[in-house]
């Protein structure tokens, strides 16, 4: 336990149930608060048990490689002469909070709300990289979207889930600050401290508003994506149409040429018949006549097919 | 009727109308409350009739095999010296509530609101498995969604209906707790009990917020699903295009080969004609000449078709 | 005019302008209220003109055969010693309201708000069958949706319009009850009557919340329907692809077989030529040799086509 | 300037800057109000400058031929002894307002708010035809939608824009009436006048609620339209599939018949060969034998093709 | 530093940290405000530190060529005898604000809120061109949308992002004006100044409401666009169907004609056989008989094909 001018600071990391029981007994902590600290999975909240404040916060880190927001959970008890922090994840950086309070004894002198302020400021400041990471990935998604990458569907869906979870973690803080403000007079909170708290509240509102606009951007991206997929379908269909057309044009040409080549065979067949009485066979010019007939026949077909655009 | 230090507890399961009438007469219960208890299908609510509280709650169970939320309805009368519970389904576990109150006589001593607290805590705690079951099925749906299973449409639709019904059951509780809080001063509710009630309220808000995010996730899933279906259509269309192209390529080749094989027949037909005057027939080299002509004709066609990419 | 212990009840059905004028003069009704009653097409509202209450209500019936909600309009004046109801449709069942008030003189003794309560209770109770009819049709729509009936588009659209109109009729009642509650103290409304009014308010809220969930269900149904239509398109496209493939497979086979049958004709043509010098013609084995050549040619083609999967 | 019992009414239509300056000087109008009146493009609002009310209203007309809502802008100054109206469009019908006030001096006696009431009533009454025109066009759109007219896309989009603009014009009026109500006590507004103003407020709320439902109907229509377009695509695709199938069936038949006709030619070719040793040629029954062979060959093919469903 | 009758005005453009420190020391500015001014990226807000007002504003310019809203950030300190403005972008036009205040010493005499008013009025007036630019581009988009330009997808998406950012910048101003109004009494703000501030607030609300309607218009445009893309797909598909039909009609005709030409060859082949006993060969009319047979065969096929619509 660290002491700073009559003020004790206890920082616990993943405490056992027994440690929590000892703590509860020594500092007379409320059983409901201890139960919350033990069970976890709470939303951010602020409770007053006598002159002890109990606060639950949801610090967050952005894991950019998997595009996930990782949430910790911080339980904070602040009494007139002590502060107890219980963490289960590495964030937030409470060492920095402590150094700050040690460096500013005049802040610590303002009472429990000052400690609360310092922790809130750190937690909220640590939301900024999350916010920046989400924005960055949304920018990437926009590029990916219009470049036609089909993987973007899942990426949008997953990032939207993360944004929603981040909003669920940060939005309750606004209500918490409102509650704090409503108690400024009742608990005679120092004017200067009020300003510090409002400064953090301001930061939280900015984070929440940006979270909301991220959600809307991803919603738009989903809808735009659906349209782009259909647009790509149109192009696919156009190409299919062109292919089909070109293929059948060629088939027609082959068939037409086959018919043209074939036509003279009919003449040849006729003059290959073995009838006894076929005057043309005896003609001196019979053979050239037949060749001429063949040529004429083929040429006629060629002209007809050409006119009908089959060739 | 069970008595605990001057406090009576009556638990009814599917009571008859006559039983309700007896009860109403003995405990002077308000006719409107009795009518609600008799007819059921109420939303969660809290009414004060003199010093008797009347509360309607909507306990829930998750039937994971059919992915449905099953709702019960609990009617609770709490007076200074008695508590009456009326159930029509098996949940919530009121035996546990009673054991808890028996084990904590100091809680019971805090008056009717303490009984109310204990019942509310149980009902709200029993919402947790519903919440977990819904989350689990949404996770499954996400996997199913991106794996391309067409059955997912109905599953999303049905689960969204269940989530909406669950929200309809849980959201009114927040207003009920707000009403309770507004009455804390008027009804001189014990400070400790206020804290217990706020603890349950906190749990309810968490359930409600998660329900809302489930609704949004399923909404996103519906939209993503539509896009994926179209995306799959694009692939279908691409495959159709490729099949069509490959088929017509082959057809062209067969036709081209048929034409090539056929072309020499024309020459054969010509020299099979029976004209008396056909000089080539008398040539010694007539036959090889004809064969050469045939080969030349076929080869020319082959070259032409090859050049036009018909072969 | 019916009198019950110093209290007069006048029920008008589609009154003429003259009748309304007589009424206004006799009971000193406010011109604005009379104008509203004359013109109709009002939203539900409550006005106090001195000690006379003026209420507009929108009773509803569900016409299940055409799936439409039919709205009536009820204008109600309640003074210390009279109640005037003006209807233009057959609902609500005011006879029942009157019988109820006659049977409960103690209720009537509580003043104008008691009459208002009885009418409100009837109107709101008559919303239940509408609510049930809408739910039933939504259930039918869900089945129709997934069974692939294209008529469901219009049915969803039309029912959503009806639900929206029903919401427009019922939502203002919540505000009306809020206004009544704000006046409980000022107008010294009997405590028991307050409870009765809250009971009806509870029913209204349930109706409004269910209306909202109907709207969302139909919204989801619309989106799901769009997806199902595209899904059916995929199946159509798949079938089209399979048909196209199967057809072109058969065409290829026919063409291949024609080419195979055709190939020997070339050999026959060659040995049908009339050249004087064709050694094979004089061979004893010439004929079998030609037949063997034909078979070999056809077989080669068969093998080639088989290998290329054209057969 | 028209005087009615010590009350002056000035109606200006598109005044010049100079006219406005003269007016401002004579009636001591506030520069901000004069600037608003000069520049226009204001939202509806109410300001009090001393005992002068300044009101901006947005009258509207429906141009049914182009399906557009045309907005005017009315600036109204009402002091204890004067009313000044400034219009730039022809609506609203201020002559009617003036006649009404002249006919009811008791109304005018209630002070500036009475003039405000009369103008508001006229402006809001003139919203009714807009509301009716929009509803009528939405009904037309519904018919057009399900009749499959592709022009409906733009019509829905454009009408939705008009509805949104109409909502932007009418919604601020609700806030304006709320502000007026909050001032009823402070400015000792006559009770009767309060009722008149509430009557208009009621009308405004009805207009606003209907506007909102128009917006939702058009939103639904947009989504339904997208589905219908895809549904029509399915039918197109089905028809394309049927056409393709029928065409390829016919092609197969032609090819099959050609092959059947062609097959006997092979036999003819064989017996047309000129080999010296071909025993069948010397048979008496050779010729019928060949014809039988041809018939058998063709028939076999016919049977085979028939079995394979190629014919 | 510029002095106007005991009032100093300091305008800084991109100050260094050292300059800010000097300023903070001289005017006793609050460290939190100085930190905000140093770090930037704040939302619009108003803080009171003693008798000094600290205001953050987000001026905007519309870059029409790239269709982007460019945001500046203005930090303003106003004390009883000084105003300090810190800018990082060129807008807003603070020179105009200063000239206005110099020209109206009576305004300056109303205290710090007067300076705040003048700056707010300028910043909000500069939102008008942004608003107009956005509206203009939305009009262009509507034309582009219905003209079928596929580039419109990205344009809608990008402009919607800009509109959302503009809304995020302007919406907090409404809350700021509300806060100012709540302080009117406490800080004894001059009545005239209250009116001036309300005039600006009015302008801001107009901007915010239009921003909201821009967002909805673009949302509608996105959905309409998706429908139009599908509609175009239907046309593509119809054209594909027609092409396919026309192509296969032609193929059928070519095949049919080939079969017709081919059929007589069979007859020719038969009479080209070399059987010793073929009675027709000896007939005088054999040859014409054969030609008649050929004609009959071809004609029959022609008639059959014609009837079956293959020709
Ligand atoms: Mg807890
Ligand atoms: Mg990344
Ligand atoms: Mg900070
Ligand atoms: Mg990244
Ligand atoms: Mg996830
Ligand atoms: Mg996560
Ligand atoms: Mg009831
Ligand atoms: Mg399951
Ligand atoms: Mg619990
Ligand atoms: Mg499961
Ligand atoms: Mg269901
Ligand atoms: Mg269910
Ligand atoms: Mg499609
Ligand atoms: Mg009226
Ligand atoms: Mg039905
Ligand atoms: Mg009832
Ligand atoms: Mg039905
Ligand atoms: Mg309709
Ligand atoms: Mg209807
Ligand atoms: Mg102005
Ligand atoms: Mg029209
Ligand atoms: Mg009117
Ligand atoms: Mg019309
Ligand atoms: Mg337009
Ligand atoms: Mg317009
Ligand atoms: Mg700050
Ligand atoms: Mg531009
Ligand atoms: Mg301005
Ligand atoms: Mg532009
Ligand atoms: Mg962007
Ligand atoms: Mg930008």
Image (cartoon, coloured by chain):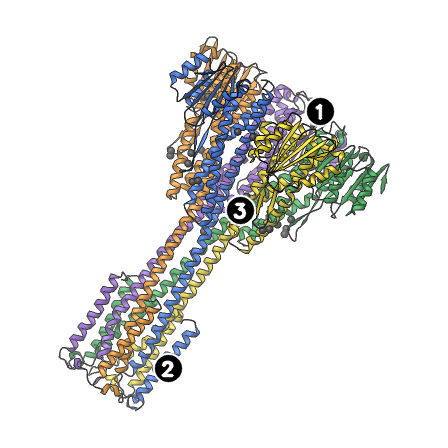
Chain colours: A purple, B green, C yellow, D blue, E orange
Circle 3: is it few (<14), some (14-19), or many (20+) Cα within 10 Å?
some
Chain to which the residue tagged by mark 3 belongs: C
**Towards the viewer: D3 or C66:** D3
The disc at residue A81 is: 1
Most extreme residue toward the left is: A284
Image-based side of C33 in relation to B173, left or right? left
Nearest to viewer (mark 1 / mark 3): 3
Chain to which the residue tagged by mark 1 belongs: A
Q: Residue at x 43, y 39 (%)?
A: D158
The N terminus of chain E lies in quadrant: top left
Q: Are marks 2 and 1 on the same chain?
A: no
Q: What is the distance, in whole Å, between disc 2 and disc 1 at their CAs?
A: 113 Å
Image-based side of B223 in relation to B39, left or right? left
Please tell me whether residue C274 is drawn above or below residue D90 in the rendered image: below
**Towards the viewer: C292 or A8:** C292
Q: Residue at x 71, y 32 (%)?
A: C7
The C terminus of chain E lies in quadrant: bottom left
Q: Looking at mark 3, is its residue's CB closer than 8 Å to ligand 18?
A: yes
Image-based side of D156 in relation to A53, left or right? left
Query: Which residue is the site of mark 2?
Result: D296
Image quadrant where residue B87 sits: top right
Query: Which residue is the site of mark 3?
Result: C158
């Amino acid at each position: 336990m660290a002491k700073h001018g009559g003020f004790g600071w206890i920082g616990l990391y993943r405490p056992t149930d027994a440690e929590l029981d000892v703590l509860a007994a020594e500092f007379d902590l409320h059983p409901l608060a201890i139960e919350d600290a033990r069970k976890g999975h709470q939303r951010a909240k602020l409770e007053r048990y006598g002159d002890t404040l109990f606060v639950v916060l949801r610090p967050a880190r952005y894991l950019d490689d998997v595009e996930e927001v990782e949430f910790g959970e911080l339980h904070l008890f602040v009494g007139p002469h002590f502060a107890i922090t219980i963490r289960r994840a590495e964030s937030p950086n409470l060492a920095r909070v402590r150094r700050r309070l040690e460096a500013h004894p005049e802040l610590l002198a303002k009472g429990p709300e000052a400690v609360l302020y310092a922790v809130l400021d750190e937690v909220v400041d640590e939301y900024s990289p999350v916010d920046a990471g989400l924005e960055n990935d949304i920018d990437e998604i926009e590029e990916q979207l219009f470049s036609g990458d089909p993987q973007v569907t899942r990426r949008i869906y997953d990032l939207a889930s993360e944004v929603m979870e981040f909003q669920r973690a940060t939005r309750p803080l606004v209500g918490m600050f409102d509650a704090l403000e409503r108690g400024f007079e009742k608990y005679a909170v120092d004017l200067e401290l009020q300003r510090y708290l409002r400064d953090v509240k301001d930061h939280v509102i900015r984070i929440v508003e940006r979270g909301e606009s991220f959600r809307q951007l991803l919603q738009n991206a989903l809808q735009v994506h659906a349209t782009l997929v259909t647009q790509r379908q149109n192009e696919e269909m156009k190409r299919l149409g062109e292919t089909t057309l070109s293929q059948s044009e060629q088939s027609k040409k082959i068939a037409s040429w086959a018919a043209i080549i074939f036509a003279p065979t009919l003449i040849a067949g006729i003059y290959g018949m073995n009838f006894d009485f076929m005057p043309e066979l005896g003609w001196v010019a019979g053979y050239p006549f037949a060749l001429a007939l063949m040529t004429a026949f083929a040429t006629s077909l060629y002209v007809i097919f050409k006119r009908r655009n089959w060739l």
